[in-house]
Amino acid sequence: MELLRRIGAAFGRRGVPQGMEERVPPGQYVTPKMPVMSASPTPRVRLAEWRLSLYGEVERETQLTWDDWLSLAEDGVALTADFHCVTQWSRLNVGWEGVPASEVLDLARPRETARFAMLHCADGYTANLDLAAMRAPDALFAHRQDGAPLAPEHGGPLRLVVPSRYGWKSAKWVIGVEFLREDSPGFWERLGYHMRGDPWREERFAAR
Ligand SMILES: Nc1nc2c(c(=O)[nH]1)N[C@H]1C(S)=C(S)[C@@H](COP(=O)(O)O)O[C@H]1N2
Ligand SMILES: [Mo]
């Protein structure tokens, strides 16, 4: 076994560049380009009608227009993060610009009882997340990717990015954040995907 381990270490992991082993969760390989992964066709979103609604377990229901978003984003952040899809590709160093998710959540003054969120999207897609993951320092609502406006197929005008969870939780075309007391399954979670989806623990599918 020790010999096998040493041979493995010398060759590295399949699909993982030398020296990147720490960055790539178990069972993932690195892809140079960001694939498009959508369960349905790209929805048409008109900025004049676009709203982001924050509701549920909150003190102050909030709706942002696109102009509201742009002024929020003036004091926004740019960060680089790795993206891990449950179908096993990982893309390293994706550049995002937007607003930290915790800052967006706080606009609605979540109640203390709010512990989870359901993300609602313009294509009818949903994804559930624990608020602790959404409040991680690298989680953001993003309207720009790799220095350009977020392309429609990648979730433009606005998507969520939660690098500490598998990609299916990074909701594209996000239009609603519903705050919840209890966890509830979204689109893929109802079909057997893991409720939490931490790539470092390889939480791909729910135990059955
Ligand atoms: N609204 C919506 N968001 C979504 C999806 C989707 O089908 N609809 N697919 C998810 C999946 S499985 C992944 S891996 C990422 C892919 O993002 P990309 O298409 O920008 O690579 O978006 C996630 N967000
Ligand atoms: Mo995915």
Image (cartoon, rainbow, N blue to C red):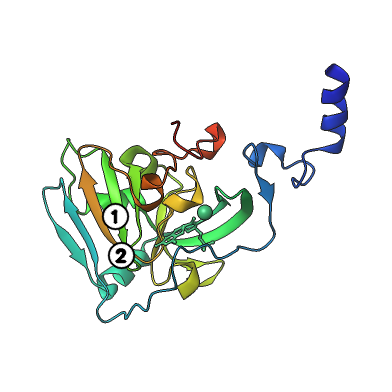
Q: Quadrant of the N terminus?
A: top right
Amino acid at the residue labelled 2 = Leu
Within 10 Å of the Cα at label 1, are there few (<14), some (14-19), or many (20+) other Cα atoms? some
Q: Quadrant of residue 11?
A: top right
Q: Which residue is mark 1?
A: 104
Looking at the picture, how far across and down is residue 39, in whole percent? 45, 63
Looking at the picture, how far across and down is residue 192, in whole percent? 42, 42
Label 1 vs 2, first from the N-terminus = 2
Look at the numbered discs 1 and 2 and tell me whether their residues touch, using CB distance below 8 Å: yes
Along the viewing direction, whichever of 127 and 34 lies nearer the viewer: 127
Amino acid at the residue labelled 1 = Val
Q: Residue at x 23, y 37 (%)?
A: 182
Look at discs 1 and 2 and give the one toward the viewer: 1
Looking at the picture, how far across and down is residue 145, in whole percent? 52, 66
Q: Which residue is mark 2?
A: 72
Image-based side of 91 in relation to 18, left or right: left
Image-based side of 174 in relation to 142, left or right: left
| Residue furthest to the front | 208
